Amino acid sequence: MQAESGSQVSPSGWFEGRCHVYPARVYYEDTDAAGIVYYANYLKFAERARTELMRCLGTEHRSLMRDAGIAFAVRSCNAEYLLPARLDDPIIVRTRIRELRGASLRAVQTVARRESDGAEKVLVELVIRLVCMDGELKPARLPGVVRAALGDLVEGQ
């Protein structure tokens, strides 16, 4: 795995500019009887990538729940399935933050297969709206530390 020059490579992924890159592999548990990734499992790959993005920013979910009393929930998800991934495929999940609002954010995630020549083929494109909630499951403003960390990643700013 290679990261952008100067970026640190870790199991949590790395940043290429404002894009978080999370490497993964397709395991048997991710596939159906034909060895093809079951469609709902792409959502799991995307969730893991968002969790690792937060970890890379130093804002882990557990500490946000404990210290700020907030959690994130998916408000909406639009998935475009383009090509299948198969058992043992190395995949890359790229996460881009497109919009940051008071209590929500919009991210675009792509799941791509890493080809033997190093090229990537996009398999799935996801547009996700996340909302920040308090302990009573009511909308809550993004904490300042989260807003600052994610604000640097918003594309187009």
Image (cartoon, rainbow, N blue to C red):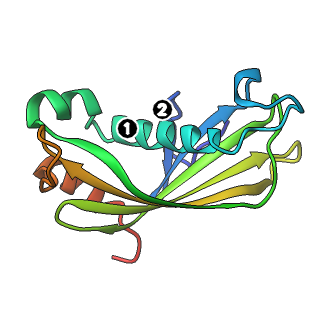
Residue 155 in picture, x, y percent from top left: 41, 70
State which quadrant residue 82 falls in. Answer: bottom right
Residue 131 in picture, x, y percent from top left: 27, 55
Q: What residue do we see at 73% from left, 24% from top?
A: 27
Quadrant in the picture for the C terminus = bottom left
Q: Is residue 101 above or below residue 93?
A: below
Q: Is residue 82 above or below residue 73?
A: below
Q: What residue do we see at 56% from left, 44% from top?
A: 43
Mark 2: secondary structure: loop
Residue 32 in picture, x, y percent from top left: 80, 31
Tag 1 or tag 2, which sits nearer the N-term?
A: 2
Name the residue tied to disc 1. Answer: 56
The front one of 80 and 150 is 80
Name the residue tied to disc 2. Answer: 12
Q: Residues within 10 Å of mark 1 (few under 14, many from 20)?
A: some
Q: Residues within 10 Å of mark 2 (few under 14, many from 20)?
A: many
Q: Which labelled disc corresponds to residue 38?
A: none
Query: Marks 2 and 1, how far apart in space?
Result: 7 Å
Q: What residue do we see at 57% from left, 52% from top?
A: 94
Mark 1: secondary structure: helix
State which quadrant residue 137 falls in. Answer: top left
Q: What residue do we see at 43% from left, 44% from top?
A: 50
| Mark 2 touches mark 1? (CB < 8 Å) | yes
State which quadrant residue 35 falls in. Answer: top right
The amino acid type, in three-letter code, at marker 2 is: Ser
- 147 horizontally vs 32: left or right: left
The amino acid type, in three-letter code, at marker 1 is: Cys
Instruction: Kindly give the residue lying farthest to the top in the view shown.
Output: 28
Residue 127 in picture, x, y percent from top left: 51, 63
- 5 horizontally vs 87: left or right: left
